[in-house]
Amino acid sequence: MQNPFTHIKTIFFDADDTLWQNETHYRQTEKQLFALLGLNEKDGTRELLQTEMQNLPLYGYGAKGFTLSMLETAQRVLGPQKAAAVTGPVLELGKKLISAPMELLPHVRETLQELAPFYTLAVATKGDLLDQQRKLKNSGLTSFFAHAEIMTDKTPQAYLALCQKLGARPQETLMVGNSLRSDILPPLEAGLQAVYIPCACGWIHEDVPHTALPPFTTLKTIQALPALLKGETNA
């Protein structure tokens, strides 16, 4: 069977939880929030997720919108008077999340070093502009990328627009990421190739049943990507 990746010329990489740790910081913050609110993990997750889903159209993705959703959840769960006592601690949780230390995922740097001489590499991520720019700068990876695109949301149209911006043909472009909802389904719909690298800690909102997706390739780690592109392995 012909390898569908040997003709790839441009590679888009998701950032959070593909290049560096992110969701682990959110899960730790959530646990601290639930303790402040006196909620167990199941109830706290339900309450916070409800708020986040309502607020996504207003705030978009990222730590700042997440902080506002934490504050709103506290208001709803505790009531305005009791919530006032935890407003300061919740804001501190948000600031701590934004300033969380940068930790690259295993094998990311060496993989980018191996790919950069042969492919056009770009970051394709979503979230708060300032937050994502800060994380990319702190990662020390900027020299590997020809471009970094911070999207409001990852849609097929957004991926096609990025291809056009970089002069890349969709059929010769690969998206690599950890989110089925954001990094796999939209690129495939846009005519790109996609490689899924699951992360140990994900956000439930980004899950999509595999049965709802066209065929795609899964790798255990980013380290396997160069061999896949060369046709030396199937996964």
Image (cartoon, grey):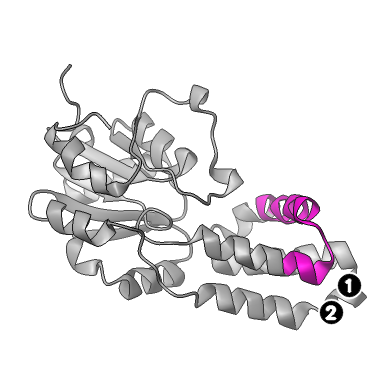
Residue 113 horizontal/vertical position (percent): 15, 59
Label 1 to label 2: alpha-carbon separation: 6 Å
Compared with 203, 229 (above or below) is above
Report the residue marked by disc 2.
84
Q: Amino acid at mark 2?
A: Ala
Q: Is any atom of residue 169 visible in this view? A: no
Local crowd size for mark 1, using a 10 Å CA cut-off: few (<14), some (14–19), many (≥20): few
Residue closest to the far top: 1
Quick check: 212 left or right of 55? left
Q: Is residue 223 magenta?
A: no
Report the residue marked by disc 1.
80
Residue at figure coordinates x 24%, y 61% from the top left:
109
Label 2: state its secondary structure. helix
Q: Quadrant of residue 141?
A: bottom left
Q: Amino acid at mark 1?
A: Pro
Residue 76 horizontal/vertical position (percent): 85, 62
Local crowd size for mark 2, using a 10 Å CA cut-off: few (<14), some (14–19), many (≥20): some
Label 1: state its secondary structure. helix
Compared with 80, 109 (above or below) is above
| CB contact under 8 Å: marks 1 and 2 | yes
Residue closest to the far left: 117
Determine the main secondary structure of the stretch shown in magenta.
helix
Q: Which residues are magenta?
A: 33-54
Residue 102 horizontal/vertical position (percent): 40, 72
Q: Is any atom of residue 43 visible in this view? A: yes
Residue 59 horizontal/vertical position (percent): 60, 61
Quadrant position of the N terminus in the picture: top left
